[in-house]
Image (cartoon, rainbow, N blue to C red):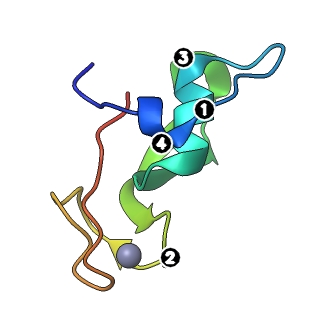
Amino acid sequence: MAVHLSSKGIRIGKGQSAIDAMKQIVPHWIHEKIEDPSYVGGFRYARNCKCSECGYESSFEKKSCPHCGVKMYQID
Ligand SMILES: [Zn+2]
């Protein structure tokens, strides 16, 4: 993982993965889950995504948010 986060002081709670913890603090694109029984697990992720910082919706993941300009991290 290329993200350097030690300065942010991440706390990882019980039952929470490091990835979940990171997602709460680093800017990233949010893909909504859509229920879909034809997919394994019963859901799929929307192709559209939202900026975790300002809520701007994009049709695909860009390197940074065109609305608030935040640099996005690819977490998963
Ligand atoms: Zn944004």
Distance between mark 4 and mark 3 Cα atoms = 11 Å
Label 1–label 2 contact, CB within 8 A:
no
Answer yes or no: do the residues labelled 4 and 3 have beta carbons within 8 Å? no
* Beta carbon of the mark 1 residue lies under 8 A of ligand 1: no
Q: Earlier in the sequence, mark 4 or mark 2?
A: 4
Depth-wise, is mark 4 or mark 2 nearer the camera? Answer: 2
The answer to whether the residues at label 2 and label 3 have Cβ atoms under 8 Å apart is no
Place of residue 31 in the rendered image (x, y in percent of width and height, measured from the top left): 47, 51
Does label 3 point to a residue whose CB lies under 8 Å from ligand 1? no
Task: Pick whichever of labels 4 and 3 is earlier in the sequence.
Answer: 3
State how far apart marks 1 and 4 are (Cα).
Answer: 26 Å
- Check disc 3 and report the residue beneath it: 40
Q: From the viewer's side, name the closer residue of 15 and 33.
A: 15
Q: Position of 40 compared to 71: left or right?
A: right
| Quadrant in which residue 15 is drawn | top right
Callout in the foreground (1, 3): 1
Amino acid residing under circle 4? Tyr
Q: In the rendered view, tell whether residue 10 sits above or below residue 16.
A: below
- The residue under label 2 is 55
Q: Quadrant of the C terminus?
A: top left
Q: Type of residue at label 2?
A: Gly
What's the CA distance linking mark 1 and mark 3? 32 Å
The Cα atoms of the two marked residues, 2 and 3, are separated by 28 Å
Please identify the quarter of the rendering in which residue 51 is found. bottom left
* Mark 2 neighbour density, 10 Å: few (under 14) some (14–19) many (20 or more): some
Q: Amino acid at mark 1?
A: Ile
Does residue 38 sit above or below 70 in this rendering?
A: above
In the image, 21: left or right of 48?
right
